Amino acid sequence: MPGINHFLNIDDIDAKTLKEILAHAHELKKLKFNPPQLFKGLSLAMVFDKKSTRTRFSFEVAFKQLGGHTIVTSMDEIQLTGAESIEDTGQVLSRFVDAIMIRMSDHATLKKLSENTTIPVINGLTNHSHPCQIMASILTMEEKLGPIAGKKIAWLGDYNNVAHAFVQASEKFDFELTLAVPESLRHKADKRANLVDTAEEAVKDVDVVVTDTWVSMGQEGKAIEIFESYQVNSKLMTLAKESAIFTHCMPIHRGEEVTEEVLASPASVIYDEAENRVHEQKAILAWCLADTEVNV
């Protein structure tokens, strides 16, 4: 519905707004030990059809630290996609809570839900994109390297929902993104993507090296041999800038997409990024709930 600040996809939001959300996240992190009670009296519904550690904890901690109340449920516990229509579920939840964060496979269902609510809906992950994760990644990169504009970032491995969201973000935040993915998967890539043949070519002189698991949830048993040349290891990291960082949205399959040596190195910022999910979620929620006169 017009006028509602849904956070469904990076492409749906203008660059100025995204940069303002990011700047707010930086400010809210500074208030980590004295968080403003922005959401006092408000409730957030959190709905999951996929297992979650970082999304579950970061959203719940973010909303509660800023004074709100959360209600957590699985898809199996509610009528969404069950006996009740998406339209009815959206309208009913709109009468109960102030916002919905949902983590589900089908992006079309998420979008349809948002079209049938009078409250904001936030994409906690779909098979199409993972916008909250990318915002936390950029927050971390800026903390470590300064403003993201103009930075060079390499993505290695699968072309998945996170890679897709990174491509969208590269235009909004003005950074240079190069992806090295197997040739057989390149047809899936966003037409705006800058694709190269090898990991070595992608990583040369970059500021950030990023990868993700080769086997996402629901893909158990997937063949991974085609990804082996895209593993992030110490030798590969030497091709990046000396100041380069490595990040990964987690969970990690250690020894597959990245070696233990890289994970244990000073370049690794995986846990900083995980923590930053909390602070970025706070800023996303604050923007989504701006019509409730939420402010710092």
Image (spheres, helix red, strand yellow):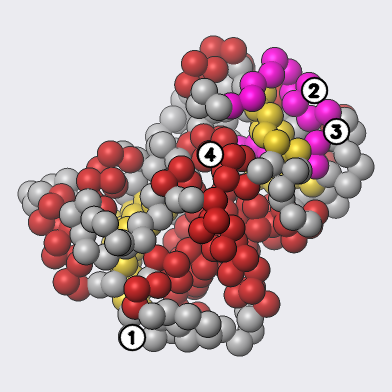
What's the residue type where badge 3 is placed?
A: Asp
Residue 186 at x, y = what percent? Answer: 54, 17
Relative to 164, say whether 279 is above or below. below
Q: Mark 1 points at which residue?
A: 41
Write down the region rendered in magenta.
193-212
Say few, some or many: other residues with alpha carbon within 10 Å of mark 1 (under 14 / 14 to 19 / 20 or more): few
Relative to 160, say whether 150 is above or below. below
Mark closer to the observer (4, 3): 4
Relative to 227, say whether 53 is above or below. below
Numbered circle sitting on residue 205: 3
Q: Is mark 4 on a helix, strand or loop?
A: helix
| For residue 140, side relative to residue 87 (left or right) | right
In whole angstroms, how far apart are the C-alphas of marks 2 and 4?
23 Å
Q: What element carries label 2?
A: helix
Q: Which residue is drawn at 17% across and 46% down?
A: 81
What's the residue type where badge 4 is placed?
A: Gln
Numbered circle sitting on residue 200: 2
- Which of disc 3 and disc 4 is earlier in sequence? 4
Numbered circle sitting on residue 168: 4
In whole angstroms, how far apart are the C-alphas of marks 1 and 2?
52 Å
In whole angstroms, how far apart are the C-alphas of marks 1 and 4?
34 Å
Residue 119 at x, y = what percent? Answer: 26, 65
